[in-house]
Image (cartoon, grey):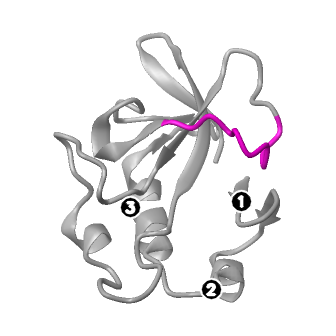
Amino acid sequence: TLTSAQAAEKTLNSINEIKLNVPQPTNILELLRWFANTVSIDNHGNVRMTFEPESDYGSHHYGNFEGMLSRPPLGYRYYTVGNIHKDSLTQLPPHVRNARTGTIGWNRGRIIFSAREANGGWNIQQI
């Protein structure tokens, strides 16, 4: 499930809906493309992370202090990735960092996902 958290949780059915629902230019399409190619999806649809959600690519815990999202499933925590200004040893690739540079809102794109550590890796429940 792909969710947009602009003002409320919303399920999107296609990438074209993002183009229609984003009010100003951002790097969200490049970020989503990168994320889809970075995570691992097995034959059963299980999504596993290939990076550390507490540090790599500027990702970090997302507290959901605004209450925009429902509570994550038991044992899971929310994380976010996409802030290109967040210091990290592992940076997002240039095509994501430089997309739409200079336009208003170009660094507003974020992906929020719920994940938990299991069996030596990270499982993603919801994106």
Give the percent coordinates (x, y) of residue 72.
Answer: 75, 30
Compared with residue 66, is residue 3 higher up or lower down, i.e. above or below?
Answer: below
Query: Main structural element of the magenta stretch: helix, strand or loop?
Result: loop
* Residue located at (65% from left, 23% from top): 76
Q: Is residue 44 left or right of residue 111?
A: right
Q: Secondary structure at mark 3?
A: helix
Q: Residues within 10 Å of mark 3 (few under 14, many from 20)?
A: some
Amino acid type of the residue that numbered disc 2 sits on in the rendered structure? Lys
Answer left or right for 106 relative to 15: left
Nearest-to-viewer mark from 2 and 3: 2
Lateral position of residue 56 relative to residue 2, left or right? left
Q: Amino acid at mark 1?
A: Ala
Residue placed at 71% from the left, 80% from the top?
17
Please, what secondary structure does the residue beneath circle 2 have?
helix
Q: Nearer the viewer, mark 1 or mark 2?
A: 1
- Cα separation, mark 2 vs mark 3, equals 17 Å
Label 1 environment density (alpha carbons within 10 Å; few <14, some 14–19, many ≥20): some
Q: Residue furthest front?
A: 66
Kindly indicate the quadrant of the structure image that contains residue 120.
Answer: top left
- Residue position for label 2: 19
Give the image location of residue 115, x and y in percent. 58, 29
Q: Which residue is mark 1?
A: 5
Q: Which residues are magenta?
A: 61-70
Q: Is residue 72 magenta?
A: no
**Image mark for residue 34:** 3
Mark 1–mark 2 CB contact (< 8 Å): no
